[in-house]
Image: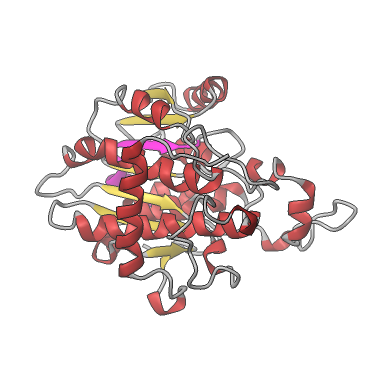
Amino acid sequence: MSFGLRTTGAEAALKLQDHIRGKNVLITGVTQGGLGGETARVLSPYVNLLILVGRNPDKLQETLQVIKGETPSVNVQTVSIDLSSLQSIRRGALEIAHPIHVLINNAAIVPTTELTRTKDGFESQFGTNHLGHFYLTSLLLPRILSAVSASYSPRVVNVSSAAIHDPRVGSNIRLDDPNYILRPEEYQRMISYSVSKVANTLHAREIAKRYKSDGILAFSLHPGGVWTNLVNNSPVDLRQELGLIDENGKVLQPERFKSIAEGTSTHIVAAFDPLIKEYSGAYLCDCRVTAWNDLPACLNEDNALKLWMLSEELTSKGSIEIDA
């Protein structure tokens, strides 16, 4: 099977359909105009069950209607979960009773100009993009383990970003102060976003190591530069800072962007390609496994373990205290 830069999600799903059939797939962040919604759409002709998770019930229904319009026979469950709220995650996880063959942690929020916090006091990007998915995955672990069989290994797929290469982050991924409690004056929106995406990759790496003997595989990925609704909803000055648009709002170098259809292919490959099983824990880009020596040094086993222990501590507390 040959996949690459311009492979679409639909093309990848068609080639991998025999590995998708009969599977229950949970995807977070399934808004229309985004990668999660498109991933759900292209999988719908083949899966046994789609579990669509999102914060906004109206947007969940919109995605459901699109999918049902194309594949009327598809079996779909929608679950409203706000990943910035541990209470919402706990409540939503209780609604999920089926075995989960593939969990795609896709949802993310855009960088905020000022330091903002989740309902539990976590820095918004670290709290939503990483801790929200960490906690949801932990609660769903019994459902994932129940999908293990002698012939099948379920997968956890974390959607990360090329932001892990941000040179301003380097080896300092703020494990001592990820929520900017000690040093709130150090907050910079893109550095915080990058750290949350590093955390997505470290999370997948530790899952792969920790649950290898239980039969669970895990991967992280960069979908490519894709102009999604997440980009459209980001602040104008952020798009200018990232070199996406000029001062007049014109898109710079539009040819460098993948279409949303192309941006979902790496999701599909990470979730279903049998040829990458031996690379559990790896980071994918353009549908291919990336060599670890091409990735930042902070993505090491020591940091993966430290982040896991910190994430367990933070989510088990339920909230953190912020000094006035």
11 lies above or below 243: above
Q: Residue at horizontal 79%, vertical 48%?
A: 236
Q: Is residue 2 visible from the viewing direction of this image? A: no
In the rendered view, does 265 fall on the left or right side of 311? Answer: right
Which of the 4 quarters of the picture holds residue 22?
Answer: top left
In the rendered view, does 248 fall on the left or right side of 215? Answer: right
Q: Which of 305 and 227 is in front in this view?
A: 305
The image shows residue 148 at horizontal and vertical percentages of 15, 44
Q: Is residue 204 visible from the viewing direction of this image? A: yes
Highlighted range, magenta: 15-29
The image shows residue 248 at horizontal and vertical percentages of 90, 53
Q: Residue at horizontal 38%, vertical 24%?
A: 76
Which of the 4 quarters of the picture holds residue 247?
Answer: bottom right
94 lies above or below 249: above
Question: Is residue 26 a member of the stretch shown in magenta?
Answer: yes
In the rendered view, does 45 fall on the left or right side of 302? Answer: right
312 lies above or below 164: above
Question: Is residue 206 a member of the stretch shown in magenta?
Answer: no
